[in-house]
């Protein structure tokens, strides 16, 4: 049978409903599937995951919402534009007004049908964590955004929602979710940057060092602390 709305009947008689579940390192959509004994069951399972039904209009374009229209948000927008993946990019901000700002951060769900992708570009770690949870609960696609002018090891593990800015150097390390690796910072091999953290401009994370969740390594700082063990 036809694959209307991404739902079709398989040769084993089960129904399969496809949905976008993420974006890979090259900015391409990653798809997943749920299954049911009937079309309705598969559609309901997909609805529970992504929050829309078959008859609701959903953008098939990878439009991007950026939460935060400050200086970091503008830098993130430049990276996103340089990837040539997103057809349209707009901002949400609770305080700033201006061109290309379509609403407030807390209203992201209202724009999901048009903007299936979203990214938190807020410098405050705790606020970034708050909105990261909100976007995940709303089942947005959340990319990682890496500047073409950054150097990132092929063995580095980079979490979702993380921004790696121009001239950053990232070795074979682990960078968690929703982190900011700022301009000209240096992350050495075997180090770990935990979720929702910032390594600010020109900071150096030494080999094997650990940066805890929601931490900030200040500009020009040399960080060598290891993870505490019991």
Image (spheres, rainbow, N blue to C red):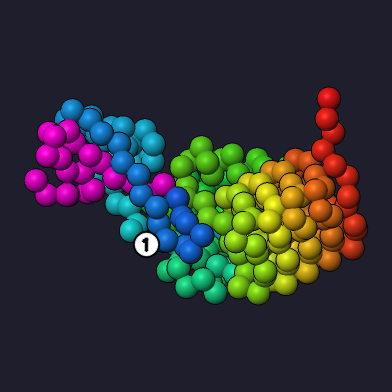
Q: Which residue is mark 1?
A: 61
Q: Measuring from the top left, give residue 188's x and y in whole percent.
A: 77, 58
- Asked if the stretch drawn in magenta spans residue 14, the answer is yes
Quadrant of res 210: top right
Q: Residue at x 76, y 58 (%)?
A: 187
Task: Please tell me whether mark 1 sits on a helix, a strand or a loop.
Answer: loop
Q: Measuring from the top left, give residue 97's x and y in whole percent.
A: 64, 63
Q: Residue at x 52, y 51 (%)?
A: 142
Q: Measuring from the top left, give residue 38's x and y in whole percent.
A: 16, 30
Q: Which residues are magenta?
A: 1-21
The answer to whether residue 119 shows anywhere in this view is yes
Q: Nearer the viewer, residue 163 or 102?
A: 163
Position of residue 38 relative to residue 95, above or below, is above
Q: Residue at x 88, y 50 (%)?
A: 224
Q: Residues within 10 Å of mark 1 (few under 14, many from 20)?
A: some
Outermost residue to the top: 230
- Asked if the stretch drawn in magenta spans residue 74, the answer is no
Q: Quadrant of the C terminus?
A: top right
Q: How many marks?
A: 1
Q: Nearer the viewer, residue 62 or 204?
A: 204
Q: Residue at x 64, y 55 (%)?
A: 156
Position of residue 15 relative to residue 77, above or below, is above
Q: Measuring from the top left, give residue 180's x and y in whole percent.
A: 71, 56
The answer to whether residue 72 shows anywhere in this view is no
Quadrant of res 185: bottom right
In the image, is 184 to the left or to the right of 12? Answer: right
In the image, is 14 to the left or to the right of 175? Answer: left
């Amino acid at each position: 049978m036809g694959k209307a709305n991404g739902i079709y009947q398989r040769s084993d008689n089960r129904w399969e409903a496809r949905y976008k579940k993420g974006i890979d390192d090259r900015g391409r959509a990653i798809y997943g599937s749920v299954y049911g004994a009937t079309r309705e069951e598969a559609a309901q399972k997909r609805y529970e995951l992504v929050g829309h039904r078959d008859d609701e209009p959903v953008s098939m374009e990878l439009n991007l919402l950026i939460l935060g229209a400050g200086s970091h948000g503008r830098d993130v927008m430049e990276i996103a534009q340089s990837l040539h993946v997103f057809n349209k990019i707009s901002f949400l901000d609770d305080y700033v007004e201006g061109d290309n700002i379509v609403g407030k951060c807390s209203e992201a769900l209202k724009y999901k049908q048009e903007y299936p992708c979203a990214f938190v570009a807020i410098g405050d770690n705790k606020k970034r964590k708050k909105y990261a949870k909100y976007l995940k609960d709303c089942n947005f696609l959340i990319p990682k955004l890496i500047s073409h002018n950054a150097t990132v090891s092929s063995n580095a593990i980079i979490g979702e929602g993380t921004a790696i800015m121009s001239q950053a150097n990232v070795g074979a390390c682990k960078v968690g979710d929703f982190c900011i690796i700022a301009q000209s910072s240096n992350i050495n091999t075997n180090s770990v940057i935990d979720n929702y953290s910032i390594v600010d401009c020109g900071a150096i994370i030494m080999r094997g060092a650990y940066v805890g969740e929601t931490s900030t390594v200040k500009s020009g700082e040399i960080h060598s602390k290891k993870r505490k063990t019991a």
